[in-house]
Image (cartoon, rainbow, N blue to C red):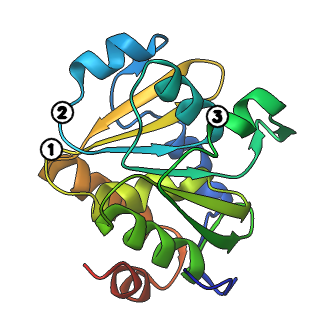
Amino acid sequence: MAGADPEVVAELPDALRGELKKPLGPVYTDAETLLADADGPLVAVGDIVTYHLLEADARPDAALVDGRTERERVDREVREAVAGFDDRLEAANPAATLSTALLEALGEAVRRPGSVVVAVDGEEDLAALPAVLVAPDDAAVVYGQPGEGMVLAAVDDARRERCRELLAAMDGDYDRLTAVLGI
């Protein structure tokens, strides 16, 4: 299991918040339509996204959840649905950051066989960016776009480069981030 090390490796600066509101791929309101366009391993970031994928009979290979959606606690039905994975890891991650614990757990979850849920104590909102870096080619990283739907970020070289740029623009240590991810 990943440790609970809350050491912050990268922190979102206010100047970058607007840039992160631009989706990394097409936005879907229907999980089945999204899944028809997704290939390869599936990585879900967020409780509601994970729930919708599960409801569409697609169990993500890796999912990161924090028990919240838009700062509110998710309801019991969602909590119970996202608990049904083959394995579970835990990680502490303060809001608007990427911690060593989250990055280690993300990397382990993506590489581990079976379905793995990472229960985040804190916030998992920024995890889609490093997920694109660590996921294999042709994987699908799915995350929520508040008030709009689910974003399908198909992993390819161009999307990885965009995520590298965004992560490098954050306050922190980009080299440490990539080292923790093992990339």
Q: Does residue 9 appear left or right of residue 97 in this picture?
A: left
> Splitting the image into 4 quarters, where does residue 50 fall?
top right
13 on left or right of 135: right
> What residue did someone put label 3 on?
81
Image-based side of 111 in relation to 180, left or right: left
Q: Secondary structure at mark 1?
A: loop
Q: Amino acid at mark 3?
A: Ala
The relative height of residue 29 versus residue 38 in the rendered view (above or below) is above
The mark lying in front, picked from 1 and 3, is 3
Task: Say what amino acid the circle numbered 2 marks.
Answer: Asp
Q: Position of residue 112 (x, y in %)?
A: 33, 67
**Secondary element at image label 3:** helix
Mark 1 and mark 3: Cα distance apart in space: 26 Å
In which quadrant of the rendered view does residue 82 lie?
top right
Which of the marked residues, 2 or 3, is nearer the chain's N terminus?
A: 2
Mark 2, residue position: 39
- Give the CA distance from mark 2 to mark 1: 6 Å
Q: Residue at x 46, y 34 (%)?
A: 22
At horizontal 46% and vertical 43% (from top left) the residue drawn is: 44
Residue 16 or residue 103, whichever sits in front:
103
- Quadrant location of the N terminus? bottom right
Q: Nearer the viewer, mark 2 or mark 3?
A: 3
Q: Residue 134's spot in the image, x, y percent?
A: 29, 65
* Residue that carries the numbered disc 1 in the rendered image: 138
Front residue of this view, candidates 48 and 165: 48
* x then y, percent, for residue 114: 34, 55
